[in-house]
Amino acid sequence: MDAKQRRLVQEFRAISSVSESVAAQFLRRTNWNVETALNEYFGSGTYQEESRRAPQADPAKITAAFNKFKEEGTDVIGPDGMQRLCDELRVDPTDPVMLVLAWKLHASVSCEFSRAEWNEGLTRLGVDSVEKLRGKIPDLRADLANPVTFKEIYSFSHKYSREKTQRSLPIELATGLWHLLLDGKWAKMDLWFEFLQQRRIQSITQDQWDMFLEFTHAINDDFSNYDAEGAWPVILDEFVEYYHKKTAPQATATATQ
Amino acid sequence: MINLCAFYHKGAPRNPLAVKWSGRWHSLVYQGVSYTMSKAAASKPPGRPGQMTLEDGWAKLEATIHRLEDDVEHGMQRTFTSLDFANNYSVAFTLCTTLQNSTPELYNRYKQQLAKYCQEVVLVDIRKNHGEQLLECLYRRWEKYKLLGKILNCIFQYLDRFYTQRDRYTVNRAGADNPLPLKDLADSLFKVHVFDGIKDQVNGIILQFIRREREGEMVDRNMLKSAVEVFIVMGQNKLTLYETDFETIFLRDTAGYYKRLSQQWIATDSCPEYLTKCEDRIAQEMLRVDAYLHSTSGPKLNAVMNKELLAAHVTRLIEMENSGALALLHQNKSDDLARMYRMVSRLDDKDGVLPMCRYMKDHVIQIGLAAVAEQGKVQAADVAAFVDRLLEIQAKYTELVSKAFQKNQHFEQALKEAMAEFVNKQTDKNTTAQLIAVYVDEYLKEKAGQASEQEIDHRFDELLMLLHHYVERDLFQEFYRKQLAKRLLMGSTLNEDAEKSFVLKLKQKYGAAFTNRLEGMLTDHTMAGELQSDFNEHVQDPAHDIGGLGMEVLVLTQGYWPAYKFEDIGLPALMTNAMEKFKEFYCQRKKNRILTWIHTLGTASVNGKFSSRAAPVEIQVTTYQAVVLLLFNNGAALTRQQVCAETRLPPKEVDRLLTSLFAHKKYAVLKKSTEEDEIDEADTFTFNRELPVKTRHLKIPGATRLRDEEVAGVKKEVLQDRKYVIEAVIVRIMKARQRLTHAELVAEVIEQLKNFKPDNKMIKSRIEDLITRLYLKRDETNQNLYHYLA
């Protein structure tokens, strides 16, 4: 997307309040004409679904809920408020579903919801109380299971978790997130962590982060279809190399036995 | 040329048919005759036709033919008058015109008569001879036969005009045996009845002569030429007959001959001997074509020679031990190599030229690597000798390629690859970049002073050629910059024109970006002189007095010059004052500039009074040394501690400076309180007034050459620079193209980077970095596609 297209996406979202990718999807389908795209969207099943899911939410109640958790003297729900919110939602703060919630709210700062994020987010979800929000949790879990939304949540988690002035995520945070999101989903996870430690990798960029998920999807577990001449980040080249170096002597050893 | 001249002239009706001829087989002129004849026939209509029968008429004509056969036999001694001609013509004419159906019959009888003549007279006569005589006889008979044919053509001209011609062109008798025009008929009869019967024999004779000539005998080439030409003439001037009946056999014979010969040679001769013979023989055969064969045989003969003499043995020749390509290269036999090239280049490149190329490449690499290994062994690498050796190798093989191998592109390429192979081979300690830079440095400092402009120019060109084989030219540039800076700062350059010319050459070859900083440095240096004289004038004014201190300042533009250490050092008031004055002066002239003093590069002259000399001695030192030395001006005895405090320099640096001032006997301007070389806390130093000084100047040595840590620094800087260069190139490309796949982008980046070869990983890392910094982004669906972000 170039700058102009990005602006069109923003325009589209301002009216429809859908995610960036959905907006882009409709715009692309209508050759970047916002008006036609919006017409199409409101006539589409996506909208029907959204509007069904978003019954009238009372702005006053939403604000009340916000005030309940907000930090004294600020206009955000901070770590402390977040903990209380989790308690009331009856989810663990380290539950990945909280990431989905942050994603839904378009939260920009880790462990923080601003008033605007809260208000707009809850309106979009069509809930105006913590109880109703709790009722949404299964939906949010479903997003985690859906590969398309998972990819977005995964990518979002990097941006969300890093310091706003930074472009990359410290390795401890990245490792934690990976555990949270990918544990049990990919066979070579342990090897990956071992590699990161061996090479003393300090941080992970957004690109490395995104491409890693791509890598776990596209590449066989024995890396046989990996193309080092391709556009994979260097860190993945080195990882595959690391794997081959590690497994090669073993392979010959078993062969001689 | 045969001249059938002027019978039946108006003014000379009694002229006999006078025929003169002289010796060639072709280029006959007889059109004129037939033209005159037809006029004669037309202007003199036949007499009364009467009731002539075919038999009567033919009897007359047959008699005439016999008579003419006889005449020709005796060299046209007897007379055949125009009246005779006219009568006979009229008979033939009458037969054709009155007895319509007799024309074919007349034609047949004529044909039979001529055939009989061929068989019974001509062939029989020729067969009486052998060898050379046979060829001569054939030649003679053919000439006579042609003459006879010509006269008969005239007599029977009516046939040609109204029978053979008409039938040929107007009557469609497809498939039938069309009657030939009389001239062609005569030729074909000769071919069928005479030539076909003896051509194998003739062929054999010619080939035998050729073989004898090949063995060194002298033969009559004209006779051979005539004999060969018979084949061409018999083929109606088409080459089919020559090709099938002579050339093919000749070529086969030649092939056999040289096959045998080459096997004899290859068994005994060395490669150059063989090829010399080969070249001679090929030249001889080509002369043969010129002398007596048809020119179209040239290429074919050439091909046979190439095949039998060269193609059959080329591999063995090139690989021949002790005298093959490799041996000749080792022995520097450029003439023999040139001949080898001349010979093998006659073949397909893959048979001769490319194997030779491989040998040359291997040989040059071997020599080059030997030189590199040699250089690695010598401890204090003798830079000049090593680079000289590389230059020598380069010059030698460049000349070989251009002279012996006629600048063949395969050889040029092979040499290039070979040079690149070892020029890029790094010895453990030094990179070639550094060695070349040091070489140029030494050359400019030591030799460029005496050498002539052409010599310098030539040497520079050679060096640049050598450098061109080197991949990491940016590394060279960095080393060179460091060296240039030193030369300029130390004032050790002897030849400023040479400096400029070298940089200019670099610029021409690698572009302005490559030499930007070098040029900037040279400009700074040039400007400095002007600035200095202005400043000298400036300080004449008492208001700007700098206390009689002679001060020279070189203003360097940051960015062009290598990064130097700025160190805080406690300077004497005299110097700080002068520096302030200069700053004032400079900032007046150039606005908005910040001056920073780099004392590490400074030098100073200090006058010292020694007891050994009456006059003061000029001590030449670095600024640092001077600062330390001046502390002792009042005769003080100072410890290291005190020197550190005064100069604000770290102890390690002070140790180094003190050591340089006392350790060497000859230059010991300071005296240490104890004898040991090690400096102890308690040791004190004083000025060494008793130092025996023999000259008016005393130059105390300071470090001049790039040291090891500097070298490592250079590499680091260059690697860092490369990152920027690659990024700049990526951004430039992506800006122009907007979107590119990974492979395309990498290919373009490599294509654009001329001064070093980045590896894939390096480029990839840069791309990733640019993605992180939001210059680029990956396509949402195709991760191999990048978009440029404006």
Image (tube, coloured by chain):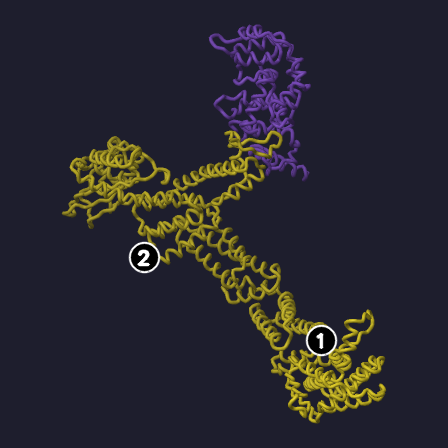
Chain colours: A purple, B yellow
Please state the chain letter of the residue tagged with numbered disc 1 in the rendered image: B
Task: Pinpoint residue B56: horizontal percent, then vertical percent.
Answer: 84, 89
Is residue B703 or residue B477 the one in the foreground? B477
Amino acid type, callout 1: Gln
Is residue B675 or residue B138 the one in the foreground? B138
Find residue B664 and report its image quarter.
Answer: top left
Determine whether B547 is above or below B7 in the image: above
- Separation (CA) of disc 2 from disc 1: 77 Å
Q: Secondary structure at mark 2?
A: loop
Q: Is residue A151 left or right of residue B54?
A: left
Tell me the residue at 71%/90% (across/down).
Answer: B82
Q: Is residue A19 left or right of residue B507?
A: right
Task: Pinpoint residue B144: horizontal percent, then vertical percent.
Answer: 70, 86
Task: Pinpoint residue B181: horizontal percent, then vertical percent.
Answer: 75, 77
- Camera-side mark, 2 or 1: 1
Task: Pinpoint residue B450: horizontal percent, then vertical percent.
Answer: 32, 57
* Residues packed near mark 1 inside 10 Å, few (<14), some (14 to 19) or many (20 plus): some
Please state the chain letter of the residue tagged with numbered disc 2 in the rendered image: B
Exactly how many numbered labels are in the figure?
2
Q: Secondary structure at mark 1?
A: loop
Is residue A81 or residue B76 the one in the foreground? B76
Q: Is residue B456 left or right of residue B247?
A: left
Question: Is the C terminus of chain A in the top left, top right, bottom left or bottom right quadrant?
Answer: top right
Tell me, yes or no, whether the two marked residues, 2 and 1, touch with CB atoms within 8 Å. no
For residue B450, the mark is 2
- Whether residue B99 is visible, yes or no, is yes
Determine whether B201 is above or below B585 in the image: below
Amino acid type, callout 2: Gln
Determine whether B597 is above or below B373 in the image: above
Residue that carries the numbered disc 1 in the rendered image? B236
Between discs 2 and 1, the one toward the N terminus: 1
